[in-house]
């Protein structure tokens, strides 16, 4: 790969106009030479393996919620079982609630400054250590609270519920808050 046109013993990178969309033949990796997706379907290129993995996480979480401890479902256990340590459970729920509130606040705060094709991510990266620490503490509190029921199976159970949430929440949020892109490009 040469990277450009030979000029005086070296190579000079050629630039194209901002409005030009290349066919992919040139070696330029500039963002202005790529076609921008026009619809959300073009933007999301998923493989069948990723779709199967997501379906397995969701099916596993539904199984956990429905069967619980084989006598009652998971929600009934959380509300009525005396084996659960209540204070760590409630503190873990507060931690997860704070994480969700903080995530929504930072995402919605930066919503107006983002382009339609950009991914949903944190606008303030200095908050990531706080959110990560809060998530780890919440996971440990949930593990401590639910350990009397499932013992060592508590860890994979909580991880499965976490992964199912990671699969579901972005799709639910993006579909309800996605702005319309009626803006014409001039470049």
Image: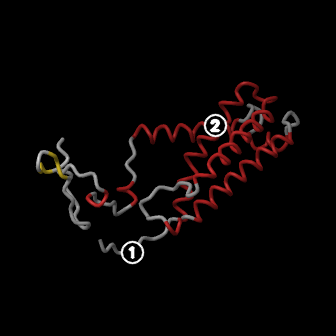
Please report the residue visible at 68 percent of the width from the left and 36 percent of the height from the top.
158
Please tell me which residue lies in front, 20 or 148: 20
In the rendered image, the vertical position of residue 181 relative to residue 52, given as above or below: below
Instruction: Give the secondary structure at mark 2.
Output: helix
Residue 2 in picture, x, y percent from top left: 17, 43
Distance from the alpha carbon under mark 2 to that under mark 1? 44 Å
Rendered residue at 44%/64% (across/down): 116
Q: Circle 1: is it few (<14), some (14-19), or many (20+) Cα within 10 Å? A: few
SS class, disc 1: loop
> In this rendering, would 74 be left or right of 16?
right
**As displayed, is residue 152 above or below residue 108?**
above
Give the left or right position of residue 53, taking residue 83 as reference: left
Q: Where is residue 31 in the image (x, y as percent from the top left)?
A: 31, 57
Task: Give me the residue at 65% from left, 44% from top.
Answer: 132
Rendered location of residue 94, percent (x, y): 77, 50
Disc marking residue 63: 2
Which residue lies under the disc numbered 1?
183
Instruction: Tell me the quarter of the picture where residue 164 sits.
Output: top right
Which sits in the foreground, 26 or 70? 26
Quadrant the C terminus occupies = bottom left
Which quarter of the figure has residue 103? bottom right
Give the mark count. Answer: 2
Tell us which disc is closer to us: 2 or 1.
1
Image coordinates of residue 121 in percent, x first then y, are 53, 54
């Amino acid at each position: 790969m040469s990277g450009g046109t030979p000029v005086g013993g070296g190579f000079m990178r050629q630039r194209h106009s901002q409005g030009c969309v290349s066919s992919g033949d040139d070696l330029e990796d500039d963002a202005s030479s790529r076609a921008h997706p026009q619809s959300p379907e073009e933007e999301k290129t998923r493989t069948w393996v990723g779709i199967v993995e997501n379906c397995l996480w969701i099916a596993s979480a539904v199984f956990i919620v429905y069967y619980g401890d084989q006598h009652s479902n998971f929600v009934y256990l959380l509300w009525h079982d005396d084996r659960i340590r209540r204070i760590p459970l409630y503190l873990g729920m507060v931690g997860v609630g704070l994480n969700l509130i903080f995530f929504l606040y930072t995402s919605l705060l930066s919503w107006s400054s983002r382009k339609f094709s950009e991914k949903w991510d944190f606008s303030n990266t200095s908050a990531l250590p706080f959110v990560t620490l809060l998530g780890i503490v919440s996971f440990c509190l949930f593990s401590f609270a639910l350990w009397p029921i499932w013992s060592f199976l508590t860890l994979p159970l909580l991880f499965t519920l976490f992964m199912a949430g990671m699969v579901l929440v972005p799709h639910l949020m993006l579909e309800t808050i996605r702005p319309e892109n009626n803006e014409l490009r001039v470049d």
